[in-house]
Amino acid sequence: MKYFLNKNFLLNNQTAETLFHSVASSLPLIDYHNHLNPQHLAENKQFETIAELWVTGDPYKHRTMRINGIPENGITGNAPDKEKFLNWVKTFPKTMGNPLFHWTCLELKEIFDVDELLSEKNAEAIWTHCNVKLHGNGFRAIDLLRKWNAETVCTSDDLLDDLEPHQVATNLNLGLTVLPSLRSDSMIAFETPGFKGWLSKLSQTVGLEITSLNLYKEALLSKLDKFDLAGCRLADHSLDGGFVFDFSEDTNPDELFARLISGTTLPAKEIVILKTHIMVFLGLEYGKRNWVMQLHIGAQRYTSSRLRKLVGPAGGFATIGQSCDIAGLSAYLDALDLKANLPKTILYTLNPADNAPLATLTGSFSQDGIAGKIQFGPAWWYNDHYDGMKKQITTLANHGLLSHFIGMTTDSRSILSFSRHQYFRRLLCNIIGEWVENGHLPNDYELLNQLVADISYNNSKKLIGI
Ligand SMILES: [Zn+2]
């Protein structure tokens, strides 16, 4: 029997151990997509309690606490933070088999030197131990990221967000580069009640009265240029369950936009046509700026309207939506490719049924001289666990070139979630180690070391051009 969480955790053979300890473990992290709060980084925030850092803002934990029957007030409601922490402690032992169990142990061990298993018996002692550390030296926001060896992080920012905090955080010179990346959803959220207000704020910030589709595009371009100047290298669209493209040319998008801003409620089909038009416009603009376009495909965020009302749209109650419209997605990439401005693209799926189609799409839009232009992104959200990561890696290896894979990103709101990079690297080394030990790959460390270093670090660095 192997000991739980020892230095060879998840490393089940000698080759895996060698690859992890001699190559993967010491490489810096580039987290090219996450939802960290840039203001926390700019002020190098000191967290009051382990609950604030670890529990109150983590929808992954909230979800399992609800499944465990904890009342909502003790998860996201008015209960004191300590009570929420204790509710997480009650839930933690029930998460065996879920990645949260491993992440929790890794985060307490690696950052706070807690070797004991979290339980109701030691909860009080661990609460005090972690809080004392958080108030001491070397446990502020950026310090914590540096403990994970984070080198560059790219946050997700709305077109109207302030990009100053990123620069301020980088200028602290604490060894971390913080870059904005563009969360593009609001630009095509035509059907939502908030779009009109968002549009009028855009008008104000760019000093342009947006009365037509052309002026809307002009305003978008001016903001895209500001993002580019601030170091943005990636954009990100969430294409939720059932997202479709419609390239119909019999409807004039200028007219659709004019009707939309005059207050008309457009039928669903016309909304799709307008979205497709702007998605093509944006994709080409990303390409011109040499940005990376990320498409997060397949979340079903409309489930419980009760919870949506109570805790907001990203409260940890979404599910996996239907599989992707592969024909529409291909047509979209093709439309950009035909205009010679298809950006480097990362395709993520929440529905594992899309793994093979997206892994094969990495070979459909290659470009002369550019390695790994279309990426099948790392296992995302509900796939971010031992089996899901393994499936993503092996599917990509079977259908594409694993050597060009850009590796892990956390997509997380929590600084402690950077444990997932270590988890990923251990698993990656284990898979490669198994191939070697089974005689499926040569025992050639020059080749193997390069493969591990490229996936863990070099490829993501190259992809975003830093
Ligand atoms: Zn995200």
Image (cartoon, grey):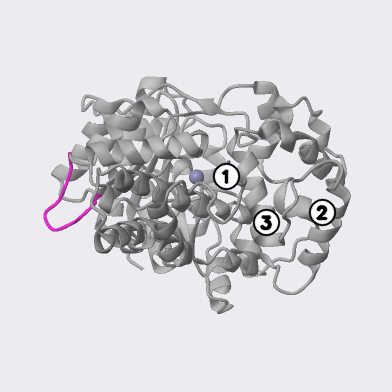
- Left or right of 443 on screen, residue 201: right
Query: Sequence-wise, which precedes: disc 3 or disc 1?
Result: 1
Residue annotated with mark 2: 126
Tell me the residue at 63%/38% (across/down). 60
* N-term-proximal mark, 2 vs 3: 3
Q: Earlier in the sequence, mark 1 or mark 2?
A: 1
- Between 381 and 14, the one lying in front of the other is 14
Mark 3 C-beta closer than 8 Å to ligand 1: no
What is the quadrant of the N terminus in the image?
Answer: top right
Decide which of 273, 445 is in the foreground and name it.
445
Q: Is residue 366 magenta?
A: yes
Which image quadrant is residue 415 in?
bottom right
The reply to whether residue 277 is in sight is: no
Which of the labelled discs sits on residue 109, or is there none? Answer: 3
Q: CA distance from mark 1 to mark 2?
A: 26 Å
From the viewer's perspective, is residue 307 above or below residue 203?
above
Q: Residues within 10 Å of mark 1 (few under 14, many from 20)?
A: few
Rendering coords of residue 462 (x, y %): 31, 63
Q: Secondary structure at mark 1?
A: loop
Tag count:
3
Give the image location of residue 156, x and y in percent. 50, 52
Q: Three-letter amino acid code at disc 2?
A: Ile
Residue 40 visible at all: yes
Q: Nearer the viewer, mark 3 or mark 1?
A: 1
Q: Secondary structure at mark 3?
A: helix
Q: In the rendered structure, which segment of residues is drawn in magenta?
A: 364-373
Residue placed under numbered mark 1 in the picture: 2
- State the residue in front, 122 or 195: 122
